Amino acid sequence: NIDKLVALEAKMVELEEQAAKEATDKAAAQVVIDKIAALPDTITLDHALVIEEARALYENLTDAQKGYVTNYDKLQKAEADYQAELNKLPPEVLEAIGKVHALIEALPAPANITLENQTAIEEARAAYNALGEYVTYVHSACDSKLVECEIVWKQLYEQNELNKANAQKVVEMIKALPTPTDVTVEDEQAITD
């Protein structure tokens, strides 16, 4: 009888853990369900960001959590409708948007930016700015990456300039030192500095 009781207690713990996990999964899915439900029925090109946000939230769910999303078909329809609207843009605009995405995606992650990435960052920014009114159709992830890369590059550039200035000061101090044949005890502090 004791074995039966122990087995039942273990089973109850397992069932409680499953119920807690299911509640957590359903709560995570509900956030996505609400985001998708808020998508408008008529999609225009102005809805890119809200569609991207809903997609990103969905993709961040586990497979189990995705199973609880009951309105995933609305997200798929919104994406298809958005793509249909996007396809109505002139081909040269679509090509320019694609070029911007490609240039930005080709950039290293912001943490890996170096001073040598200056030209690539400038080309991406120029292509981005050239989109004019169509800049809103650049994926927000690309937009964020470009800005982050620019910030990191600027910080690296400023640090590099500071390092150069400091190095120049040291060079000037060394130049001001006497030659080894002219050095005296009084020059010790200048040499130490």
Image (cartoon, grey):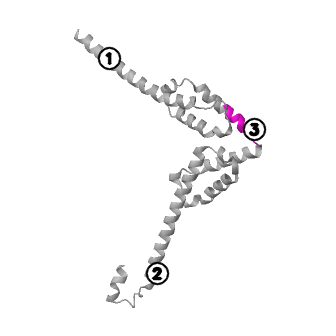
Tell me if 112 is positioned left or right of 106 in this view.
left
In the picture, the quarter occupied by the N terminus is top left
Give me the disc on residue 12. 1
Give the x, y percent position of residue 77. Answer: 65, 28
Residue stretch rendered in magenta on the structure: 80-89
The residue nearer to you, when weighing 101 against 115, is 101
- Depth check, mark 2 against mark 3: the one in front is 3
* Camera-side residue of 62 and 147: 147
- Determine if the magenta segment contains residue 87: yes
At a point 64% along the width and 31% down the height, the residue shown is 78
**Type of the residue with mark 2:** Glu
Is 77 placed above or below 127 here?
above
| Eye-nearest disc, 1 or 3 | 3
Image mark for residue 172: 2
Name the quadrant containing residue 48.
top right
Amino acid under label 3? Answer: Lys
Would you call the spot at circle 3 few (<14 residues within 10 Å), some (14-19), or many (20 or more)? Answer: few
Q: Which residue is mark 3?
A: 88
Separation of disc 1 and disc 3 at Cα?
Answer: 58 Å
Q: CA distance from mark 2 to mark 1?
A: 78 Å
Name the secondary structure under disc 3.
Answer: loop
Q: Is residue 24 visible?
A: yes
